[in-house]
Amino acid sequence: MSKKISIALIFGGRSAEHEISLISAAAVHKNLDKDKFEVRSIYITRDGRWKSVEAPSMDVETVEQGRAFSFLPWEAGSPGPGLGADIYFPILHGPYGEDGTIQGLLEMAGVPYVGAGVAGSALGMDKALAKSVLRDHGLPVVPCLVIRETEWEDNAAKLLRRVRRSLPLPLFVKPSNLGSSVGITKVGDYGDVPAALAAAFRYDATALVEKGIAGRELELSVLGNETPEASLPGEVIPFREFYDYNDKYIDGKTTFVIPAKLGPRTLAKIRTLAVAAFKALACSGMARVDFFLEKGTNRLYVSEINTIPGFTDISMYPKLWAASGLPFPRLLERLVELGFERHRNRKACVERDR
């Protein structure tokens, strides 16, 4: 019998998406084949303490009781008994996890891990930078203005005039570095922009003011390293005006159509764009790419990319791959394979430089 692969799930974290990370980690733990994997669990508290726990749990009091330890690559020895692993799986949503920080720590430690590297993670998390890179690669992005909090404090009236001139209503105002629709506001009157920016600045010092695209919301899952593939697309039909945090994780009234009903040309184009966005942002392993299909023009816009997509029971990333013929347990095995592959390739590059 072959030796089991030890895998350490890293979840929780310091971002506003802490609870979503717990739900995702519990789903990953449940779907990992225990005949093939020895699963270890590392919980990061809201204030950044690392703890060894039995398994992911949505009961914060339970995971808070775990044994604290240090995971620093410059400290002698392993992270502690039972916490060293063949590969690590960050399931951290938002800043301090999905943004390249944990990935940099794991790179310093010289260990394999699942998902995008430092550059891809950082670009995917920062919506303003991601749009700039995607635009430079000739990909269609939603028109927007990037507003920094310090600039707004100094020149609010001037910036508001620029918003009025540049972007038609409705607008969406969102933090640049966050996901799960946290801090996002739909604006139907220019007079409401200051309050929407104040809400976004609670979570990040940079905000995006985007043109609202009337049309369909579509999502695709991408999997791979050098030769990524896109899943069948899915359509999100929000219960509310837009697909907000409550719609995603609390009410559960959103409708998902998998696969989305698209013509063959649009289907081929959206899959090509998803892979192109994945490559442009230096992603690896996995990502979910979100699109708008504009009503009337049938124009596709890349909305954003998530390098650690949700893995909850209602999350699109595993659902789309299941509909494409890759069930959740096999998807996780493939992600682990890709993590090892990326680590081998990076190690080979480093050794060539010596």
Image (spheres, rainbow, N blue to C red):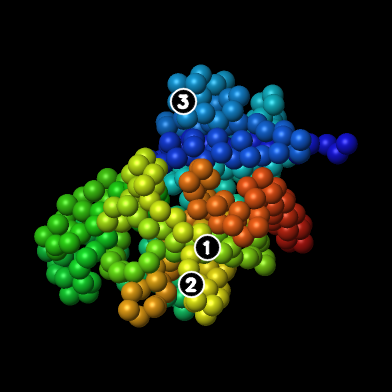
Which residue corresponds to mark 3?
59
Image height check: is 47 above or below 124?
above
Alpha-carbon neighbours of circle 3 within 10 Å: few (<14), some, or many (≥20)? Answer: few
Q: Where is mark 1, residue-wise?
A: 259
Front residue of this view, candidates 131 and 272 = 272
Q: Nearer the viewer, residue 113 or 190?
A: 190
Q: Along the polypeptide, which appears first: circle 3 or circle 1?
A: 3
Tag 1 and tag 2, C-beta contact below 8 Å = yes
Q: Position of residue 74 (x, y in %)?
A: 63, 37
Q: Relative to residue 351, is residue 172 drawn left or right?
A: left
Number of residues whose C-alpha sits closer than 10 Å to that of mark 2, classed few (under 14), some (14–19) or many (20 or more): few
User: Which residue is located at x 48 percent, y 65 percent?
Assistant: 260
* Distance (Cα) linking label 3 and label 2: 41 Å
Q: Is residue 66 visible?
A: yes
Residue drawn where x is 14% and y is 62% of the image? 189
Residue type highlighted by circle 1 = Pro
Label 1, secondary structure: give it: loop
The residue where tag 2 is placed is: 262
CA gap, disc 3 and disc 1: 34 Å
Report which quarter residue 206 is drawn in. bottom left
Compared across the picture, whether 14 is left or right of 311 comes to: left
Give amino acid for label 2.
Leu
210 with respect to 4 (left or right): left
The 10 Å Cα crowd at callout 1, few under 14, some 14 to 19, many 20 or more, is some
Measure the alpha-carbon separation of dots 1 and 2: 9 Å
Circles 3 and 2: CB atoms closer than 8 Å: no
